[in-house]
Amino acid sequence: MTMKYIFLLFFVLLAVDTSWAATLSSRGDDVRIWSAPLVARPGEKLELIAVATTDDLSELIVTDPAGRRNRLNVVRGGGPPWSLRAALPAPAHGSYLIEATREGKVVAKAVIQVGKGVGNRGSGEWDLSTQALYAAWVEHLFNDPPEVSLSFPSLEPVLRDPRRNFLHDYLRRGEDGKFPAEPDCADLSYFLRAYFSWKLGLPISYRFCSRGSAVAPPRCGPPEIDQSFVRTAAPASDFRKTSRRIMDRVTSGTGRTALRDNASDFYPVPLERSALWPGTVFADPYGHTLIIVKWLPQTKGRSGLLLAVDAQPDNSVARKRFWEGNFLFAVNPNAGPGFKAYRAPVANEGKRGWFLPTNTALDRRSGLPPYSVEQASLTPGDFYARMERLINPRGLDPVEAYESTLEALMEQLETRVGSVANGEEYLRTHPGAVIPMPRGPAIFETVGPWEDFATPSRDMRLLIALRVLADLPERIRRHPELYLLKGESAAAAAKNIERLHARRSRESFVTYTRSDGSSWRLSLAEIYARRPGLEIAYNPNDCVERRWGAAPGMPDFATCRRRSPAEQRERMEKYRPWFREARRPPR
């Protein structure tokens, strides 16, 4: 019997007993192969992704209905979990065998029936393979090269791009153009989880939480476990309704719950590479949340990177690297900051209803990131040193460390250029309008135009970031073990970086648009000199020149045409110490 007829017989047997095909990548396996869309049709592109939880994968191989076997071109995701993503541009009618290999050995198989009915959405539970797919899906949404500055006006361009979104049009109803996708900071992780749950037929859980007080972290009410997507291909209108309800309920307090709190949507994980999957959130002590999207390992010629995305009050979404200027960590009595994973609903015995696991039940036996409170015992210095060792375990050359930090700071400044411009555009289209300014700590947490266009939280992070770069020489003196000094003393290396900083801050620039439409270029050295002005530069009622720290007598101030009301300026002066000392006031 020829090989061709052996393959034909193989596929005939699969067609007779399709239940066998469904067990090829059973729940709990190390590797699982997924396909999209749910119903594969002849002549229409078929997306494939293999996801592994214990080790990297080598290849994806396809055997078509005629018995031809070929390697597929793949896009890799880091790990854990590891992934290979590929596509069949125009498959014919029939059965396709997909194999994932590791070092020449087949470690997973799946049979995709093209033109023969509905595919497999998984178990309908947040099990290990589903959680791993979620992590890989998030990574591939933002999987551009690290040198690309990745920013979007909202989440919509990301989800509506089939090259990014493995689940785009997964239900084959044109569903991705039928709802808005504009989550802000607190909503982003929930929106992504809800979207994934909708496509895969999973439950989604969320809570209403307080914002905490000066002496206590936020507390949350009982969970709301939405089952409207479970084991059904719900229409886009159902997702729109559910996502809207979730975004109306969750607040910036949901991520800042105490690390030992069982009544929370997220639980803290160990600071280990194996536990910090894409999709893991970082909740800072002041209410901002970022989501891990990619790890890039350190190599001989390149420093390691941990990349994350966040959303802003104006709904823009941007990718950012881990460093102290973006990831604020502090020991506060009113917050449980740090890296946290989603507490996914678990099916009751017999799958009648769902419950949320307690912290003690979230151990290593499931294969998922376990519960850990180790972050509670870390000082900020210890936390950042620990993360630096994870990202760059071989240590960093001091000059490399400086250039990487400088690049991250310049990315932050470029993001602020856009944020300030958004406020200018709003007031340009609302002539004579004055945006009301909240009182006291509410300037950091409010709703409406102030939330959308004022920048107090972002400016505080920027002031911290400026300090972090300038303080790098002192960090080298304090933590020489983090750096590759090559026989040089820590003191000498620090002195070299001080000289480098003086030069590079004169060579690095951002450009903003002044009130008259002209461009103005500011060097980083000038921005450092304007730090006092940046302590009160967050009010969108001020002209753009003041938003960049300009004052009377400075050359770019000449085009300023707008001042915030005197009463608002008085209060900003009163609040100035919060920014000078980089400390958020208690609520």
Image (spheres, grey):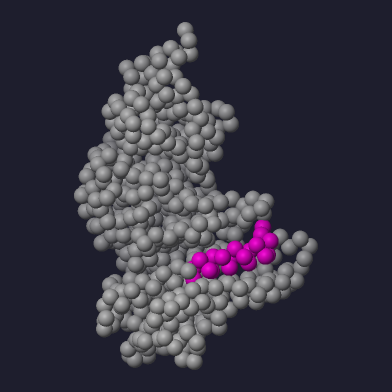
Magenta stretch bounds: 395-413
Q: Judge whether 163 appears above or below 491 on screen.
A: above
Q: Residue at x 39, y 81 (%)?
A: 515
Q: Is residue 392 above or below residue 413?
A: above
Q: Locate the C terminus by quadrant.
A: bottom left
At 28% across and 82% down in the image, what residue appears? Answer: 434
The answer to whether residue 270 is visible is yes
Q: Nearer the viewer, residue 506 or 564?
A: 506
Residue toward you, 567 or 282: 567
- 273 over 324 or under it: above or below: above
Residue 90 image offset from top left, x and y in percent:
37, 32
Residue furthest right as drawn: 487
Confirm whether the magenta stretch covers residue 400: yes
- Residue 227 visible at all: no
Magenta stretch: includes residue 186: no
Image quadrant in which you'd find residue 386? bottom right
Considering the whole magenta stretch, tell me its main secondary structure.
helix
Which percent across, then down, holds residue 80? 51, 44
Identify the residue at horizontal 79%, vertical 62% (top origin).
487
